[in-house]
Image (cartoon, rainbow, N blue to C red):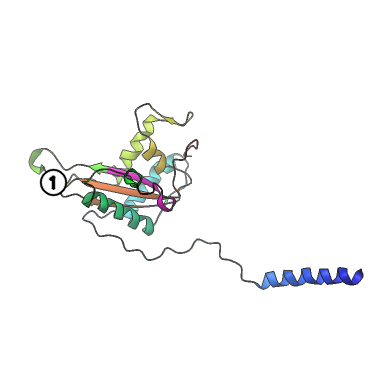
Amino acid sequence: MKALTHFMTAAVIAAFLFSCAAPIPDLRPPPERKTKIPVTDIPVDAVSMLKAHNAIRQQLGVENLKWSVQMQAYATEWAVFLSEEAGCQLRTRGSIGLPLHRNGLGENLFYREAQTGGDNIGQPAAVNESDVVAAWASEAEFYNYTANTCAAGKRCDSYTQAVWSDSVVVGCGAASCGNKDQIWVCNYDPPGNFALQRPY
């Protein structure tokens, strides 16, 4: 009996020593792969876009977002598709049959038409990163945090995605259409707007 006990103990010790010798897995997220970002006529400034997002998140005590080149490429790819293949219509991937959260990503869209009056008629409207995020943030007035609902007939989902506390990275892209209208897209990882969950 003693020999059996000794054998079992030795086996346990051997297993322990083997597990210690085995390489410890790297639990850090892998570095982003080099990603080709489609070239468009509307460059998006990462610093300005992050600053605009994080300003509204900081007001709520929500952790700052970080920039993702992969999300930027993904967002720009969709902006180009909408501008060139979808008649410059503001559509989510889900609305045309593509997975709504491909790779588990959240998505915000912004549209601005070309100028319609004055000497600059038909020219692109002056839009910057702050304008885009401010448009999404303006939905906050319709959001009731206590009830976790949006006012009847109003939208809040762009706002709640922008401030969703579980989202940690964002990347954005933009493209203009043939008529000088503009499409802006931001993608978030992980996504937000899950039913019955508050954004923060």
Front residue of this view, candidates 154 and 62 = 154
Q: How many marks?
A: 1
* Disc 1 packing (10 Å; few <14; some 14–19; many ≥20): some
Asked where in the image residue 89 lies, by quadrant, the reply is top left
Please give the name of the residue rendered at 50% of the width and 35% of the height, measured from the top-left corner. 196
Left or right, 120 with reference to 60: left
The furthest residue to the left: 119
Magenta span of residues: 99-110
Give above or below for 1 relative to 135. Answer: below
Q: Is residue 128 visible?
A: no
Place of residue 54 in the rendered image (x, y in percent of width and height, measured from the top left): 40, 46
**Residue 108, percent across and down?**
35, 44
User: Which residue corresponds to the image point at 68% horizontal and 69% vertical from the top-left?
Assistant: 19
What is the residue that sits farthest to the right in this orientation? 1
Question: What residue would you read off at disc 1?
Answer: 123
The spot of residue 194 in percent (x, y) is 47, 40
- Is 17 situated left or right of 188 in this image? right
Q: Picture quarter containing residue 73?
A: bottom left
Q: Residue furthest front?
A: 97
User: Seen in the image, is 195 located left or right of residue 187?
Assistant: right
The residue closer to the viewer here, 10 or 20, is 10
Q: Is residue 67 visible?
A: yes
Judge left or right: residue 132 versus residue 7: left
Q: Nearer the viewer, residue 117 or 101?
A: 101
Q: Quadrant of the N terminus?
A: bottom right
Name the secondary structure under disc 1. Answer: loop
Q: Callout 1, which amino acid?
A: Gln
Report x, y in % for residue 147: 48, 28
Q: Is residue 27 magenta?
A: no
For residue 72, above or below residue 148: below
